[in-house]
Image (spheres, rainbow, N blue to C red):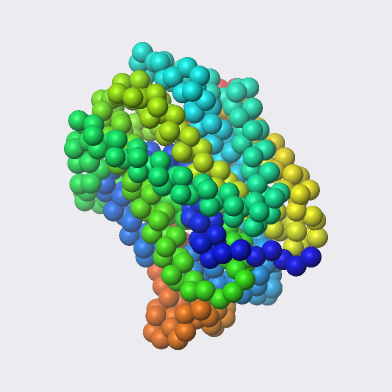
Amino acid sequence: MARETWATRIGFILAAVGSAVGLGNIWRFPFITGQEGGSAFLLVYLLFIALIGFPAILVEFVIGRRTKLNPVGAIRELGGGLWKHIGWLFVLTGFIILSYYSVVAGWFLRYTLIGVTDGYVLANPDEAAVLFGSVATGLDSLLFHAVFMAIVIAIIAAGVRSGIEIAVKVMVPAIVLLLLGLAAYGFTLDASSQAYAYYLSPDFGVIAENWTSILPAAAGQAFFTLSLGMGVMITYASYLGEDRNLAEDAGIIAGLDTLIAVIVGFVVFPFLFAAGLEPGAGGAGEIFVSLTTAFTEIPGGRLIGIVFFGMVGIAALSSAISILEVLVSYLIDEKGVERVPAAAGLGVAVFLLGVPVTMDLVFLDLLDLFADSVLLVLGALLLALFVGWVVPEMAREELSRGIGDLGVLGDAWIWVVRVPIVVVVFVSLYLGVVDYVAFLTGDFADWIAAR
Ligand code: PFF
């Protein structure tokens, strides 16, 4: 059977934007920004997106479009020797990320439903924390994880055009509209000016003091939010039927993803300040606890909460499908498995891997920290080394298709990939590994000892 392609250019762009915009922008971004010092972090992050993220998207695009293969097959075809094996890393990373991503996405579905059935009727943050505990772990969590994975499987089983492309054409515009509505509402709250000040005035002292944690957090977040380092953009670009201007597409994708993350700050921080809450007290559950508290306080909070949680659920879905597609494209291309059984089999395997996360949140940290600060950054490092040093001629030639003569910009791109990206990513990887070891020997060891 002929390999599938996108029906339209906009379909490809929306699919990539849908992949990029997800829990990373809405759940992770505000709490990392809060943890790492507000606007100081925002500034470093924006620099990373422009200088590192955008060229790194192109790295994946050229590999995908050139080979028209899944990431494992693509790297094997282009590279010899040890390079042949690095595609495996992407499959592993995809498995891990999707397993916990789906659990967290399930929480958002559950919170949407709570708004519909009961509203967010909580007397104080303690009650909100109890509610979060009951949603995040146990049978409810397992059930909504299963529901979310079932939807992901159904979309991917339907194929590139009839599944992914149709779904993102509905989902991405919906996300943007709902988010703009929420930001406009946030603007009307009295606390908004205080929230904007917190969000928008960088404290350079904070950057200088905390760069060893800000740097890997910003790098990890930049790769995570752009869906880089695990072959999503390789896979999506492999379905391109004709030669388009990849740089333009990458610019639109990085631009929209960043714009949406920044707007999320304009939504979340006013809600928090309006309810008198401190952002960034930390942790994955923070946004649920503080926002549900905020939704009991602010006028019209119930409806706003339903719209907010529902919007995040949609955003998570358009990202999750891209991860499963990487795994499925591997089975289809390399093993000749049909799409439907590939989607179902892999989806169930991912579901099972996520089950421990529904039992104890320590597994969320165990997987998220590993995938985000180590695996994605390692994947991005290997891809940059590969394109920058092993196949630069192919890369430059491929990028020029659909653009024309690249002139010095082509060389500039290759050199950015060869040196600055490699250095920054390498340092981030080192710091990420140190962080992860600290987690394993600290919190995680404590957790095991307490068993
Ligand atoms: N970019 C997605 C987000 O920001 O939520 C998450 C993600 C999707 C990460 C796909 C990695 C990936 F391969």
Q: 264 or 214: nearer the eye?
A: 264
Q: 29 or 122: nearer the eye?
A: 122
Q: Where 144 falls versus 39 (above or below)?
A: above
Tell me what residue is drawn at x 34 percent, y 37 percent: 182
Q: 10 or 112: nearer the eye?
A: 10
Q: Position of residue 419 (x, y in %)?
A: 42, 72
Q: In the rendered image, which quarter contains the C terminus? A: top right
Q: Position of residue 96 (x, y in %)?
A: 61, 45
Can residue 389 be spotted in the picture? no
Can residue 393 be spotted in the picture? yes
In the rendered structure, the answer to whether residue 183 lies left or right of residue 219 reads: left
Q: Where 138 falls versus 57 (above or below)?
A: above
Tell me what residue is drawn at x 20 percent, y 46 percent: 201
Tell me what residue is drawn at x 40 percent, y 56 percent: 256
**Residue at far top of view:** 123
Q: In the rendered image, which quarter contains the N terminus? A: bottom right
Q: Quadrant of residue 390?
A: bottom right
Q: Position of residue 89 (x, y in %)?
A: 63, 57
In the rendered structure, the answer to whether residue 388 lies left or right of residue 258 reads: right
Q: 385 or 68: nearer the eye?
A: 68
Count all numbered tags in the image, as a single digit.
0
Tell me what residue is drawn at x 41 percent, y 86 percent: 407
